[in-house]
Image (cartoon, grey):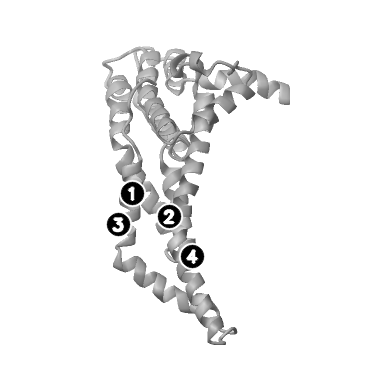
Amino acid sequence: MIALLAQAAPALDSFNPIGVLEDASKNVPGFEGGLSSALNIVLLLTVLTVAPAILILCTCFTRMVVVLGLLRQSLGTQTLPPSQVIVGLSVLLTAVAMAPTFGRMWDEGLGPYARGEQKDQMVAWEGAKKPLREFMIAQIEATGNVPTVMMILEHRGVDTSEPEQLTWEKDVDLLTLVPSFVLSELKTSFLIGFRIYLPFLVIDMVISSLLVSMGMMMLPPVLVSLPFKLLLFVLVDGWTLVAGSLLTGVMAPLGGG
């Protein structure tokens, strides 16, 4: 089983979902002239199936949902806001941050192919893939997590003794870039979460010290500190600050992918 997976791994990066539909249009009788309405529906269903994985792995959704989850824990509000609200807000923030990249993917790849202006599915695939690659590369470079890419390349058998000789275009494929990007986003989100935790931790320590000094050791400090943390968070407009910082931290693609 492991040998089969090792043989199949190099093919993952070259897998072209648009090419599957193109081959189907050529092989199904009666559809030789192009994509039919039925196959367009198949394409739509395929995109809807793959979309959650793309959203989680190749966009800033991971950073958004982890930071907001850590924020909820630092406030100590248990399940408030609910997980549905956290995930929904993360999706909307991701849509705002990724709008330029998604627009380029449609304009440079998927749009011309869907309108029939571009018949070559490989050109459409490359046009749609390039903006997303540039986004992920820009995030990895901006957060200083290039060593993560080197680690993945090393485990794939690539010589990383001279990293200055390696290039994003020739040496880093999607099979290397996507896990490197996910690890980079996890590291960044936990660093942001640590900074968010600090002021709330100080409040908890102060309240706990006051309760011990007054001999009220049986009273849970969380019950007393929670109103103060909520008051502080509301006074500084915490949700707007956190959301704005997350959106600002997602850099626009710089190119070079």
Query: Mark 3 = which residue?
Result: 240
Q: Earlier in the sequence, mark 2 or mark 3?
A: 2
Distance between the alpha carbons at the discs numbered 4 and 3:
21 Å
Q: Nearer the viewer, mark 4 or mark 3?
A: 4
Q: Which residue is mark 1?
A: 245
| Label 2 – label 4 distance at C-alpha | 17 Å
Q: Give the residue pinned by disc 4.
A: 201
Q: In what quadrant of the picture does the N terminus appear?
A: top right
Give how far across and how far down residue 53 sits, in percent: 48, 37
Spatial distance from mark 1 to mark 2, Cα to Cα? Answer: 12 Å
SS of the residue under disc 3 = helix
How many neighbours does mark 2 have within 10 angstroms: few (below 14), some (14-19), or many (20 or more)?
A: many
Q: CA distance from mark 1 to mark 4?
A: 20 Å
Asked if marks 1 and 3 touch (Cβ < 8 Å), the reply is no
Residue 24 makes an appearance in the image = no
Q: Residue at x 35, y 72 (%)?
A: 231
